[in-house]
Image: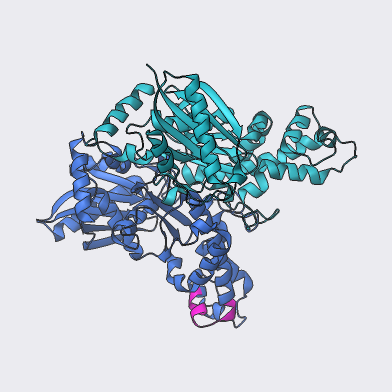
Chain colours: A cyan, B blue
């Protein structure tokens, strides 16, 4: 019987769950609006209920563990969700312990951007690459770095907070308090803000017609640009320049073999790509210019299948990801993991 | 008999060699001006000659291998120096092969900033830390990242090119062609340039008196600031702000346990530290603010002892650094390395 993982992608607005096969195929999927304001007990109750729904749909399933992607900051080794801005009232919640006790299954936790990076690396745009940087560009900008074959965690799992890399001295103040964060100038929110400032309700512009007169979003800009709207194309150009500056930094700092762009704005990747590429060619040192920059392939499923792979891909369920690959083979389960991993490639 | 490594620090202006013990002690040291303009054969001849001098001083030495720090870009695994700007005529020089054949010893190669990072991590300011970012601030800005217990190499060994991280849209154009590189605004060169622009020959300022009327260097600024000169203190303040912005990025991106600042400007670390720290406190997200930022301890010996540790610290001499720690213990030499490493800690 096929081994399956229960996978959860815990977002501030939506909680999604799935049963996933080791090859990355989603067998069945469910979701619910996250009861974020009701606190951690309520949301953990939702996870347990969704798991029940999934298992009821596949009563014969050989479920070997639970993988979860959740908003950071979190400590993946300790299994603790520290204090995500999007989940009110979560403070040092020992999510792994709670769910492991309830289900009697191994549980593993990773921050959502890292889970999506893992998903794209193992099953999506990054297959076969030894190292990649995954950048998610939507409301904010997040990232995950796969280096030398494993997620780059850093102290307390806090590496790759790329949205708060300073890339300029201009622009609106970031919600974090600093000026010039990558996220503050290059997120979908920033693009929408520029589009809103450029237009006015009732001005007859395509952007405002698409937005129904309200604030213009990044999605409206992409849609208007596809229709050939000049203002929208200029906004895309500015957006792509900021992305190109940030991506160049990521090349210089992490030297990945690939950059994968996901998030809502990846829907406009084809429009953004020429100027992103031109900016990188202009700013990156020569040795970095040939690194491919590609759109994500898995869309919003990247996080789910990446979370599932925490269980299905590594050896010892419950062992921290980096350790599973760093340990030597005296630890039997890890040795088995190495063999299993090879067979999946 | 104590095992020794031959270590070389190959700079564009000075070539230094040493015999180093496994504990990091330099037993004997020699140097020569690098014959950089004479090409790679001449410089390799110098390395061989210096090695002869060192071995003549310790004819009984048990030399187990050769470690070299050289300017990047270079490929540490392939052992090839690619095309360093400071070494004219070097193009894809297979330095490991050439020296291994000549000496019949294992040879390992690392870029100079990474070698210095290793030195500080193993024998200097970073002892006992699992991860650190080493930043060298002098003519330019370079760096090396130790993460999860090994040097972070990235594709072709090109990670941590931190001097060319864009942090602003202002300032003079960097030699690399871009505007806003960390190096272009925060290197010792940039500090000297600002001091030179602020003063004029014969204006009676302390800065110009120290420089003998010529261009003011970072060293003069530090010296004048120590004497309480107001202009110099203001220049130090601006310099420290730029460093603080760049260091904050390094915290967000790599999440190290420690930042170690080396290079010529580390001589003024005590003057710079308060504003560096204040800038980090102001700009970094809360979870990163408590990371210590400390001056390097080994000065210009960091690269030499770090290069030596490529041979003395890892197991299998000649094995790439990262691989020595990632392989599992079926590889006998690596297992021995793990044991040896533990005994050195």
Residue A175: percent from left, percent from top: 65, 53
Frontmost residue, B335 versus B312: B335
Residue B19: percent from left, percent from top: 21, 57
In the displayed structure, would residue A41 be above or below residue A65? below
Frontmost residue, B25 versus A282: B25
Frontmost residue, B53 versus B283: B283
Residue B256: percent from left, percent from top: 43, 54
Which residue sits at x=66%, y=44%?
A: A186
On the image, which quarter does residue A344 sit in?
A: top left
In the displayed structure, would residue B9 be above or below residue B267? above
From the viewer's perspective, tell me whether residue A181 is left or right of residue B25. Answer: right
Q: Tell which residue pokes out farthest to the top in this image.
A: A1
Q: Quadrant of the C terminus of chain B?
A: bottom left
Majority secondary structure in the magenta region:
helix
Figure disc tally: 0
Q: Quadrant of the N terminus of chain B?
A: bottom left
Which residue sits at x=31%, y=30%?
A: A337
Which residue sits at x=51%, y=35%?
A: A47
From the viewer's perspective, tell me whether residue A206 is left or right of residue A144. Answer: right
Residue B208: percent from left, percent from top: 56, 78
In the displayed structure, would residue B263 be above or below residue A25? below
Residue A282 visible somewhere in the drawing: no
From the viewer's perspective, tell me whether residue B291 is left or right of residue B24. Answer: right
Magenta-drawn stretch contains B229: yes
Frontmost residue, B152 versus B308: B152
Which residue sits at x=69%, y=31%?
A: A271
Residue B271 visible somewhere in the drawing: yes
For the record, the magenta segment spans B222-232
Magenta-drawn stretch contains B302: no
From the viewer's perspective, tell me whether residue B76 is left or right of residue A222. Answer: left
């Amino acid at each position: 019987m096929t081994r399956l993982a229960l996978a959860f992608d815990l977002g501030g607005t939506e909680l999604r769950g799935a049963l996933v096969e080791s090859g990355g195929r989603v067998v069945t999927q469910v979701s619910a609006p996250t009861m974020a304001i009701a606190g951690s007990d309520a949301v953990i109750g939702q996870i347990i209920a969704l798991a029940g729904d999934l298992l009821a749909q596949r009563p014969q399933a050989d479920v070997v563990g639970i993988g979860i992607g959740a908003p950071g900051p979190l400590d993946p080794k300790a299994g603790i969700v520290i204090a995500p801005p999007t989940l009110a009232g979560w403070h040092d919640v020992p999510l792994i312990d709670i769910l492991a006790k309830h289900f009697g299954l191994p549980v593993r936790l990773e921050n959502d951007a890292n889970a999506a990076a893992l998903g794209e690396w193992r099953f999506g745009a990054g297959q076969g690459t030894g190292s990649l940087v995954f950048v998610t560009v939507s409301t904010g900008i997040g990232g995950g770095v796969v280096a030398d074959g494993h997620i780059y965690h850093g102290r307390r799992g806090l590496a790759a907070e790329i949205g708060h890399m300073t890339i300029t001295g201009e622009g609106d103040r970031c919600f974090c308090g600093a000026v010039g964060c990558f996220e503050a100038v290059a997120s979908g929110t920033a693009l929408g803000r520029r589009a809103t400032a450029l237009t006015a309700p009732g001005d007859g512009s395509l952007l405002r017609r698409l937005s129904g007169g309200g604030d213009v979003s990044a999605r409206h800009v992409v849609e208007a640009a596809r229709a050939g709207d000049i203002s929208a194309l200029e906004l895309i150009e500015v957006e792509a320049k900021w992305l190109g500056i940030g991506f160049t930094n990521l090349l210089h700092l992490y030297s990945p073999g690939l950059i994968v762009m996901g998030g809502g704005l990846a829907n406009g990747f084809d429009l953004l790509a020429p100027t992103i590429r031109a900016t990188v060619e202009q700013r990156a040192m020569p040795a970095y210019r040939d690194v491919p920059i590609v759109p994500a392939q898995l869309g919003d499923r990247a996080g789910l299948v990446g979370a599932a792979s925490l269980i299905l891909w590594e050896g010892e369920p419950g062992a921290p990801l980096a350790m599973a690959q760093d340990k030597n083979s005296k630890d039997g389960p890890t040795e088995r993991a190495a063999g299993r991993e090879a067979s999946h490639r």
